[in-house]
């Protein structure tokens, strides 16, 4: 079984309801899906990927490496432990708002 795929071009057609239902189902059952035919240029996608990668390296990576889940994982690896890590949230999120420029990454050129 592969990653679920949603054809976004069908959102504006006769298959709109079915496509929206698929999006809902995939979000609930998988938490993600691949979106095709969305109309976003390859050039823009590559630019966003480049800036996001730079932002992570410059502003997020160090905090992630020093996080409690990563420290715990490193300890288990060092001890060659067979223990399982459960209920760990690996999500890294920061919210951005036009009203608060201070929250935006400051070291990553072209982020905003």
Image: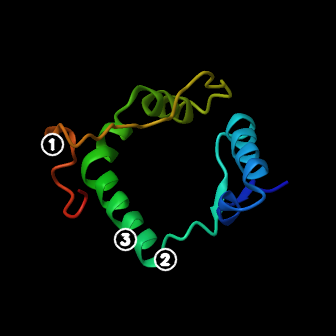
Element under label 1? helix
Q: Mark 3 = which residue?
A: 47
Element under label 2? helix
The residue positioned 70% from the left and 34% from the top of the image is: 28
Quarter of the image for residue 99 reads top left
Counting from the top left corner in percent of width and height, residue 24 is at 70, 40
The residue positioned 30% from the left and 60% from the top of the image is: 54
Query: Does 37 sit left or right of 95 as displayed?
Result: right
User: Tag 3 or tag 1, which sits nearer the N-term?
Assistant: 3
Badge 3 crowding class, 10 Å Cα cut-off, few under 14, some 14 to 19, many 20 or more, is: few
Q: Mark 2 = which residue?
A: 42
Numbered label attached to residue 101: 1
Quadrant where the C terminus sits is bottom left
User: Tag 1 or tag 2, which sits nearer the N-term?
Assistant: 2
Residue 19 lies, with reference to residue 109, above or below; the image says above
User: Tag 2 or tag 3, which sits nearer the N-term?
Assistant: 2
How many angstroms separate mark 3 from mark 2 (CA)? 9 Å
Element under label 3? helix
Residue 52 lies, with reference to residue 67, above or below; the image says below
Query: Does 5 sit left or right of 1 as displayed?
Result: left
Counting from the top left corner in percent of width and height, residue 4 is at 75, 53
């Amino acid at each position: 079984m592969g990653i679920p795929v949603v054809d976004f071009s069908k959102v504006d057609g006769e298959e709109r309801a079915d496509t929206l239902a698929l999006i809902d189902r995939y979000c609930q059952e998988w938490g993600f899906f691949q979106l095709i035919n969305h109309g976003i240029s390859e050039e823009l996608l590559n630019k966003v990927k480049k800036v996001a990668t730079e932002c992570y390296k410059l502003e997020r990576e160090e905090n992630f490496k020093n996080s409690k889940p990563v420290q715990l994982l490193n300890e288990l690896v060092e001890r060659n432990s067979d223990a399982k890590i459960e209920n760990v949230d690996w999500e890294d999120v920061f919210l951005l708002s036009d009203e608060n420029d201070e929250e935006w990454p400051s070291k990553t050129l072209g982020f905003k």
